[in-house]
């Protein structure tokens, strides 16, 4: 079965430190990969996507993600965390190269940035 | 551009009743997808509509249905509500062409509580 794993329910980091939120996937073919962020009582906001090309993709609010095909991973990173980055982060995969719009989401990782 | 709007934002219903939720996409977006978000199951795809036709469907019972109008606005309906239908229902829309094709924009959601 196709799936997305976010192994950490919560990631704690001090403000100013680098952060990584992990994501691995089990999807055949060449899926499209996404990161979304959700703030309390809000919908999901798009952060970045990987379709093809350079393995390091840059997105909104200083976030970037590294695609690793051999490890089927798409980890979210930021060089210097802000308290305002505290939110719920979702990794998502679009199978079959985007032929459908049926996103498969991970379970989410709560990022807590301490001042 | 105005974002994706969903109405109502909050809803309380009783078991056995039915409910209709509405989603207005970003101007020019012809694809509308619906997702259910619960603490236990996470984010799950319900269905996608494009040009008034259902293109994809998730693994939900027939009590969940939807439709799309000629102006791309979409509604989803849940009949014979069960307690387990309590969730945040998210609508996501996307452009049908160009660079934004695979990038979905989410609304703030409708919080449905079934008592």
Image: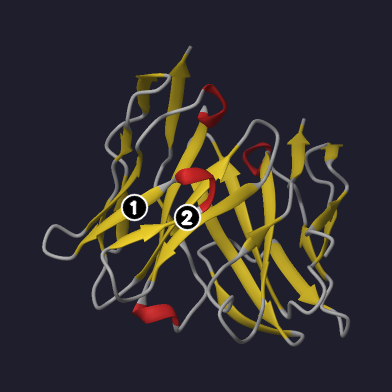
In this picture, is A37 found above or below A35? above
The answer to whether any part of residue B50 appears in the image is yes
Image quadrant where residue A32 sits = bottom left
Which residue shows up at 69% across the image and 39% down it? A42
Give the mark nearest the N terminus, 2 or 1: 2
Residue bearing mark 2: A59
In front here: B34 or A114? A114
How many dots with numbers? Answer: 2
Image quadrant where residue B6 sits = bottom right
In front here: A79 or B28? A79
Q: Chain of mark 2?
A: A
SS of the residue under disc 1? strand
Q: Chain of mark 1?
A: A
In the displayed structure image, the side of residue B91 where residue A45 appears, left or right: left
Which residue shows up at 34% across the image and 24% down it? A17
Q: Position of residue A33 (x, y in %)?
A: 38, 64
Other residues around mark 1 within 10 Å, as few (<14) / some (14–19) / many (≥20) = many
- CB under 8 Å between discs 2 and 1: yes
Residue bearing mark 1: A65
Which numbered disc covers residue A45?
none
Q: Position of residue A68 (x, y in %)?
A: 19, 60
Other residues around mark 2 within 10 Å, as few (<14) / some (14–19) / many (≥20) = some
In this picture, is B62 found above or below B52? above
In this picture, is B16 found above or below B47? above
Same chain assignment for discs 2 and 1: yes
Residue sitting at the far top:
A115
């Amino acid at each position: 079965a196709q799936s997305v794993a976010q192994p950490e329910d919560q990631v704690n980091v001090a403000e100013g430190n680098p952060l990584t939120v992990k994501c691995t996937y089990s999807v055949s073919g060449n899926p499209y990969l996404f990161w979304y962020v959700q703030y309390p009582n809000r919908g999901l906001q798009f952060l970045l996507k990987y379709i093809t090309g350079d393995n390091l993709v840059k997105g909104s609010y200083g976030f970037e993600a590294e695609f690793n095909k051999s490890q089927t991973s798409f980890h979210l990173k930021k060089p210097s965390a802000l308290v305002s980055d505290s939110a719920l982060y979702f990794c998502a995969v679009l199978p079959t190269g985007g032929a459908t719009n049926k996103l498969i989401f991970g379970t989410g990782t709560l990022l807590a940035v301490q001042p | 551009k105005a974002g994706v709007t969903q109405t109502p934002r909050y809803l309380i219903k009783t078991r056995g009743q039915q409910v209709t939720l509405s989603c207005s996409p970003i101007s020019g977006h012809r694809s509308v997808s619906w997702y259910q978000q619960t603490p236990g199951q996470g984010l799950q795809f319900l269905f996608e509509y494009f040009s008034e036709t259902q293109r994809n469907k998730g693994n939900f019972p027939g009590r969940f249905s939807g439709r799309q109008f000629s102006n791309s606005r979409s509604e989803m309906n849940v009949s014979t509500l069960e307690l387990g239908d309590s969730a945040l229902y998210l609508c996501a829309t996307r452009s049908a062409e160009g660079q934004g094709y695979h990038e979905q924009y989410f609304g703030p959601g409708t919080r449905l509580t079934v008592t």
